[in-house]
């Protein structure tokens, strides 16, 4: 065999193997169609031990299904004008949070980061894929939790965590600080509390998949988890829902 022929053959083999794996990767789920993510919502309060426990437990789940879910944090609180709160409690932006104002601020920090990294902005403003942006929100929350309940809700921790996850910047007109300490953060909190109420999310933490509660962590126990509460149980339910949604 001539060296030229050999080189040509090798080249063809190489190109075809590369294109066929590419093709398979794209083909595997859905051919030409884009796959649709399933909605995974966590109803939480940022300084609630059950929320922190659940978010820690779900870390290994998100690790595996981040690209199959649209992950949203929603927050539980009461509106001051609903008279559903004790006399003497303080409020942030018209919302009362069970673990105090500091919790409202923690919720707002997380909401501002989630909002900044929303899919429609992730690519344009941060040069991130929706999956990478979502992952950053997740890592930000994990970072806050890692430091313990006492610090969640402080600006110092939020700043530190943004630095750690290389997240959106704190400073500046469109920074997280401006959101967290201005009207935008308070509006995000009110909207989120409203969403939780509409979705029937009362307990922190509530895990909803495609709008349906699949598990609750409350008072240090798992409750209402018919499909199980281990990593593999959550992964299985999410993958099943994803296949159903995508006609697999
Ligand atoms: C909201 O109000 C209800 C009824 O008073 C109370 O049981 C619940 O703990 C309150 N939730 C928060 C987050 O303050």
Image (cartoon, helix red, strand yellow):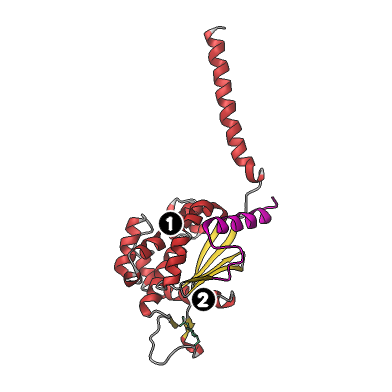
Is 245 magenta? The answer is: yes
Looking at the rendered image, the disc whose residue lies closer to the viewer, 1 or 2, is 2
Q: Position of residue 109 (x, y in %)?
A: 39, 68
- Name the foreground residue: 145 vs 179: 145
Label 1 neighbour load within 10 Å: few <14, some 14-19, many 20+ = many
The residue lying toward the viewer, choosing from 236 and 192, is 236
Is residue 93 located in the magenta-colored stretch of the structure?
A: no
Marked residue nearer the N-terminal end (1 or 2): 1
- Residue at point 47%, 55% (across, down): 60
Q: Farthest residue in the top direction?
A: 2
Q: Residue at x 61, y 36 (%)?
A: 23
Q: Quadrant of residue 98?
A: bottom left
Depicted 248 relative to depicted 114: above or below: above
Disc 1 and disc 2: Cα gap in Å? 25 Å
Report the residue marked by disc 2: 203
The x and y percentages for residue 106 are 38, 71
Q: How many residues crowd around disc 2 within 10 Å: few (fewer than 14), some, or many (20 or more)?
A: some
Q: Residue at x 29, y 67 (%)?
A: 156
Kindly identify which numbered label has been placed on residue 136: 1
**Numbered mark located on residue 47 in the image:** none
């Amino acid at each position: 065999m001539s060296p030229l022929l050999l080189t040509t053959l090798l080249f063809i083999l190489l190109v075809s193997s590369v294109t066929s794996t590419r093709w398979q990767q794209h083909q595997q789920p859905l051919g030409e169609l884009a796959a649709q993510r399933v909605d995974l919502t966590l109803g939480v309060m940022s300084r609630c031990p059950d929320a922190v426990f659940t978010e820690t437990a779900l870390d290994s789940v998100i690790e595996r299904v981040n690209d199959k879910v649209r992950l949203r944090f929603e927050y539980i609180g009461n509106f001051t004008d609903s008279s559903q709160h004790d006399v003497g409690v303080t409020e942030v932006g018209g919302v009362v949070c069970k673990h105090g104002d500091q919790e409202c601020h923690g919720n707002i920090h997380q909401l501002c980061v989630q909002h900044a990294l929303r899919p429609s902005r992730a690519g344009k403003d941060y040069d991130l894929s929706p999956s990478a942006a979502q992952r950053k929100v997740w890592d930000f929350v994990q970072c806050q939790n890692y430091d313990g309940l006492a610090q969640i809700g402080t600006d110092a921790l939020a700043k530190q965590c943004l630095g750690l996850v290389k997240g959106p910047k704190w400073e500046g007109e469109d920074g997280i600080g401006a959101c967290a300490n201005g009207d935008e953060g308070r509006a995000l909190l009110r909207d989120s509390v409203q969403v939780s109420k509409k979705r029937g999310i009362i307990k922190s933490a509530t895990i909803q998949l495609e709008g349906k509660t699949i598990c609750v962590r409350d008072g240090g126990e798992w409750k209402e988890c018919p499909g199980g509460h281990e990593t593999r149980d959550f992964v299985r339910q999410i993958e099943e829902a994803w296949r159903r949604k995508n006609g697999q």
